[in-house]
Image (cartoon, rainbow, N blue to C red):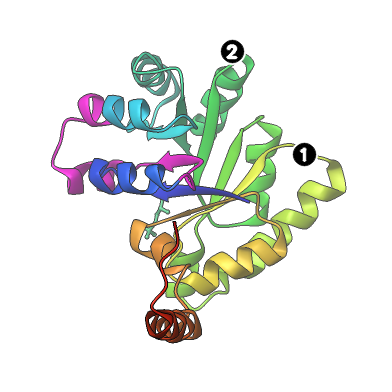
Amino acid sequence: MKFFVDTADVKEIRELNDLGLLDGVTTNPSLILKSGRDIVEVTKEICSIVEGPVSAEVTATEYSEMMKEAAALSRIADNICIKLPLTLDGLKACKALTSDGHHTNVTLCFSANQALLAAKAGATFVSPFIGRLDDIAFDGMDLIREIRQIFDNYGYETEILAASIRTVNHVKEAALIGADVVTAPPATLKALVKHPLTDKGLEMFLADWAKTGQKIG
Ligand code: E4P
């Protein structure tokens, strides 16, 4: 499973990338707002930190404007992945961009039929939003399950990018179902390592080690 971080905070991205566990980054207009930085400047910096795909989202809603924005975004770096909304114009742009060799991420996916359309449009990634479905009393994981089955039925190569991740259990469940990628906030990715028995066990080992009076190396 690939791990993407869902943020435009370069400090957090650098820290996770240094751990060697990061496969890519996803951003969106809200995350750019949160960063307080210029989209081109911050995206360029992110692309220089991470080798994998960095999703940068168009904000136009009409096809030809989307294509202009996609051209501008793709000039930022070679690892830019153009993020497009799941609308008819977004799908048309996705088809054109993927045919032209660009990587694409079709976002704001809330149904299996929408994901099917993204796959037919040749999307590199489709982003089903788990947390936002949970928020309105649907089960976001059911959507991941349905998309997995549909893509496997037809051999679609579009990768399922589980997004809007809110908990470590979301990560585990998405992995069990077979999502290809998970994108999560930095705190959620870091929380994956936590287990009280690991902390307790380490504490005991270190205490016993100190009693031996030994030193390694
Ligand atoms: C994905 O690419 C989105 O940026 C993100 O996962 C949305 O998450 P949210 O619902 O927590 O805003």
Query: Is residue 37 highlighted in magenta?
Result: yes
Q: Quadrant of ligand 1?
A: bottom left
User: According to the image, label 1 marks what residue?
Assistant: 156
Residue type at the position of mark 1: Tyr
Residue numbers of the magenta segment = 20-42
Residue occupying image coordinates x 46% and y 34%: 84
Residue type at the position of mark 2: Asp
Residue occupying image coordinates x 38% and y 48%: 16
C-alpha distance separating marks 1 and 2: 19 Å
- Left or right, 173 with respect to 67, comes to right
Q: Whole-percent x and y of residue 72?
A: 34, 16
User: According to the image, label 2 marks what residue?
Assistant: 100
Residue furthest to the front in view is 213
User: If the image is split into quadrants, where does the C terminus sit?
Assistant: bottom left
- Say whether residue 149 is visible: yes
Q: Whole-percent x and y of residue 70?
A: 40, 21
Residue occupying image coordinates x 45% and y 67%: 131
Query: Is residue 138 highlighted in magenta?
Result: no
